[in-house]
């Protein structure tokens, strides 16, 4: 079976250097928030062009702590998208705030800026756009709306390390940005991890306190915080991966360009375009089709894995039923959830594997047209 992603294959080429670094950590006796974490924070800040990067335990914590840094809590509202992974809304609710959804652009799957202004209320404190699947959200109008209304912008960049918008790397555009290092992400480790980026020192100082039980000085606690620290082993692995991330992302882009070229003429599927000012890094390569279930069954016969991201919009999730969302509230997002699916794309994917995927999709088209 050709998988959707293959983290093991991506990491195998740097296995020796990773194992060497793990042994170094083991020998050091320093396992949490040590020199590797500090080096990782500095290198990511430099790479993204921000002054601060704060490593945390995972991408969800990155979202929660960023909201807390902005003093967002009970009674506040945060505008976001209903078409994303559950953690985006979960983090907002976890701090006591309410997610306010706006529909997405059907072509990019990201928040539609034209629909934001009508959702702003006196309780709105932030906009939380998601760079979904590695595709940047349309940040210029989002930032303009935020500045005109005195709102924070927190980028959910958990799927988009290395993506850029209008020449600016995601993670450097909003007031804060959140990344995940989950094993299938573009920049990943062999477990959980995350990081928050910002150029606001006050935010950074507060997050560093919050990630360590609200403490700036050991055993002295100024506020209620979390235990959300990145392990040295994960930081050591991520430092090795950081050396290769540009090559890996370029590999993803090359594979995606070939899919675009070979599948563009097909009538049974619709490709999701990338606007000119965007650099999409293809955490996932997704197609859109009213024939989704039939295509998935067809590809399974050819030993090709597929996955649906995401089968149920957030406003229709049982856990969020208290928000009183109804089917039909966000038609673009709901249409995507019914028709979108991902096909294999990952660094290390061979030409013959991609040939097989392309041929199998084309053969489905041939069958339905006969």
Image: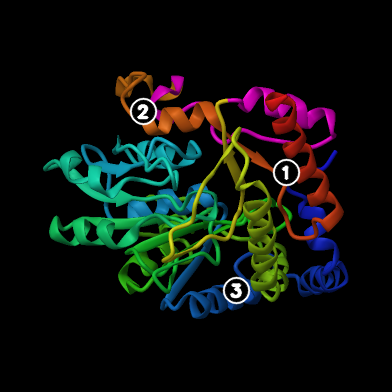
Q: Could you give the CA–CA distance between mark 2 and mark 3, rounded to whole angstroms?
A: 41 Å
Question: What residue sits 17% from the left and 46% below the top?
Answer: 117
Query: Dot 2 corresponds to which residue?
Result: 331
288 sits left or right of 346 in the view: left
Q: Mark 2, residues whose alpha carbon is within 10 Å: few (<14), some, or many (≥20)?
A: few
Q: Judge whether residue 232 can be spotted in this image.
A: no
Q: Position of residue 43 (x, y in %)?
A: 56, 78
Q: Which residues are magenta?
A: 291-318
Identify the image quadrant of residue 291: top right
Is residue 87 shown above or below 20? above
Residue 40 — which label?
3
- Counting residues from the start of the chain, the first of labels 1 and 3 encountered is 1
Question: 50 or 192: nearer the eye?
Answer: 50
**Helix, strand or loop for disc 3:** helix
Measured from the top left, where is residue 111 in percent x and y?
36, 45
Is residue 174 rendered magenta in the image?
Answer: no
- Which mark sits nearer the N-terminus, 2 or 3? 3
Where residue 105 sits, quadrant-wise, is top left
Of residue 242 and residue 74, the one placed in the foreground of this image is 242
Residue picked out by circle 1: 4
In this view, the residue in front, 303 or 247, is 303
């Amino acid at each position: 079976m050709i998988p959707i992603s293959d983290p093991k294959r991506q990491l195998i080429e740097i296995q020796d250097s990773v194992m060497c670094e793990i042994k170094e950590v083991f020998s050091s006796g320093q396992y949490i928030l040590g020199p590797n974490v500090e080096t990782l924070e500095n290198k990511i800040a430099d790479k993204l062009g921000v002054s601060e990067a704060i490593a945390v335990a995972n991408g969800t914590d990155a979202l929660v702590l960023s909201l807390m840094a902005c003093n967002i809590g009970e009674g506040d509202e945060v505008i976001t998208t209903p078409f994303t992974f559950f953690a985006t809304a979960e983090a907002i609710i976890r701090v006591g705030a309410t997610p306010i959804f706006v529909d997405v652009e059907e072509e990019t799957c990201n928040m539609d800026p034209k629909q934001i202004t009508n959702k702003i209320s006196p309780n709105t404190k932030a906009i939380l756009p998601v760079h979904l699947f590695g595709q940047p959200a349309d940040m210029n109008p989002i930032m303009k709306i935020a500045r005109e209304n005195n709102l924070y912008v927190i980028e959910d960049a958990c799927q988009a390390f290395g993506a850029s918008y209008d020449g600016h790397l995601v993670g450097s555009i909003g007031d804060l940005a959140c990344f995940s290092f989950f094993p299938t992400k573009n920049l990943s480790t062999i477990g959980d991890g995350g990081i928050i980026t910002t150029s606001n020192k006050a935010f950074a100082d507060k997050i560093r306190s919050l990630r360590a039980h609200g403490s700036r000085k050991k055993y002295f606690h100024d506020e209620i915080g979390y235990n959300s620290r990145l392990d040295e082993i994960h930081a050591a692995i991520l430092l090795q991966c950081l050396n290769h991330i540009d090559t890996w992302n370029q590999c993803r882009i090359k594979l995606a360009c070939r899919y675009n070229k070979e599948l563009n003429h097909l009538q049974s599927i619709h490709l999701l375009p990338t606007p000119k000012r965007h650099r999409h890094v293809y955490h996932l390569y997704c197609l859109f089709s009213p024939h989704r279930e039939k295509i998935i069954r067809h590809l399974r016969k050819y030993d090709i894995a597929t996955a649906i991201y995401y089968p149920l919009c957030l406003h229709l999730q049982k856990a969020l039923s208290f928000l009183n969302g109804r089917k039909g509230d966000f038609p673009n997002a709901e249409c995507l959830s019914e028709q979108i699916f991902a096909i294999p794309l990952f660094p290390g994917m061979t030409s013959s594997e991609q040939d097989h995927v392309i041929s199998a999709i084309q053969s489905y088209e041939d069958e339905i047209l006969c």
